[in-house]
Image: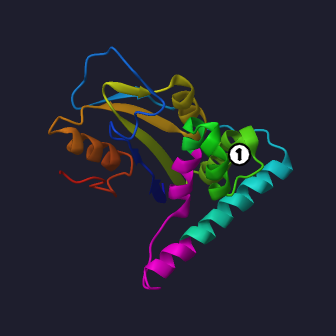
Amino acid sequence: MKQIFLFFLICMPVIIVTGCSSVEDEPVSPISIVQVYDNPLQPTELPDSIAMLAVSGANDFAFKLSALLAENAGYGNLIVSPFSVWLPLAALSNATDEANKGVLMDALGMSGMGDYINRATAHMLYDLTNDDTLMITNALFVDYNKMPQHDFAQAYMDYYRGTVMKVDFASPDAVDAVNQWGYENTNGLVEKMVNHP
């Protein structure tokens, strides 16, 4: 790989209560993989108008976010990957209730996409990664006694190349285990994603 791009989403128990259901499994300390998307994404069939709408919306989001961050940074040096902000929010659209989904879709630049957002995202991921110069890996770290609802976890795995992992956040080894995952999935380029409390 010439470049590595990492995006991760860490969910603490308080954050993931909405849209989660309890599981009976015994905790596996400190981290265990629940689901892994290990097959390459395939190009999805999308109407050209939908594909263009998705790319345009994601680009608009990127420019707006970059402008806001640059303004707040005083127009100093700024390093940001807007796609790594856009991608987890797009994934979370699958767990957002109808009352708030429209607001999220507007913020993402995806108004009018409807149920096409997952297929459009998979299409973008395929286009970005199909020549092996860029790797995008996603993970959802969930407290071991909670799990996302099955439909969300399946969409995350199928369309966002996501891994869902159960973590015992009470374990002193949890931070090291999450950092080890990041290290391994960036070929050692990111040594520490999270710090010990």
Q: Residue at x 55, y 72 (%)?
A: 66
Residue 43 visible to the viewer: no
Q: Residue at x 72, y 57 (%)?
A: 55
Total count of labels: 1
Residue 193 image position (x, y, % from top left): 31, 54
Instruction: State yes or no: residue 80 in magenta.
Output: yes
Type of residue at label 1? Answer: Ala
The kind of secondary structure element at disc 1 is: helix
Q: Is residue 31 depicted above or below 87 in this figure?
A: above
- Name the side, left or right, on which 109 lies relative to 3: right
Quarter-wise, where is residue 142 in the image?
A: top left
Residue nearer the viewer, 14 or 39? 14
Residue extent of the magenta highlight? 66-90
Q: Which residue lies most toward the bottom here?
A: 75
Q: Which residue is mark 1?
A: 120
Q: Which residue lies most toward the front here?
A: 99
- Name the side, left or right, on which 127 lies relative to 146: right
Residue 175 image position (x, y, % from top left): 22, 44
Q: Residue at x 64, y 38 (%)?
A: 98
Residue 118 image position (x, y, % from top left): 66, 40
- For the stretch drawn in magenta, the main secondary structure is helix
Q: How is the image coloured?
A: rainbow
Pointer 1 local density, CA inside 10 Å: few below 14, some 14–19, many at least 20: many
Instruction: State yes or no: residue 91 in magenta.
Output: no
Residue 76 visible to the viewer: yes
Residue nearer the viewer, 52 or 74? 74
Residue 57 image position (x, y, % from top left): 70, 59
Quarter-wise, where is residue 13 in the image?
A: top left
Q: Is residue 87 depicted above or below 71 in this figure?
A: above
Q: Is residue 68 depicted above or below 59 in this figure?
A: below
Q: Is residue 72 depicted above or below 150 in this figure?
A: below
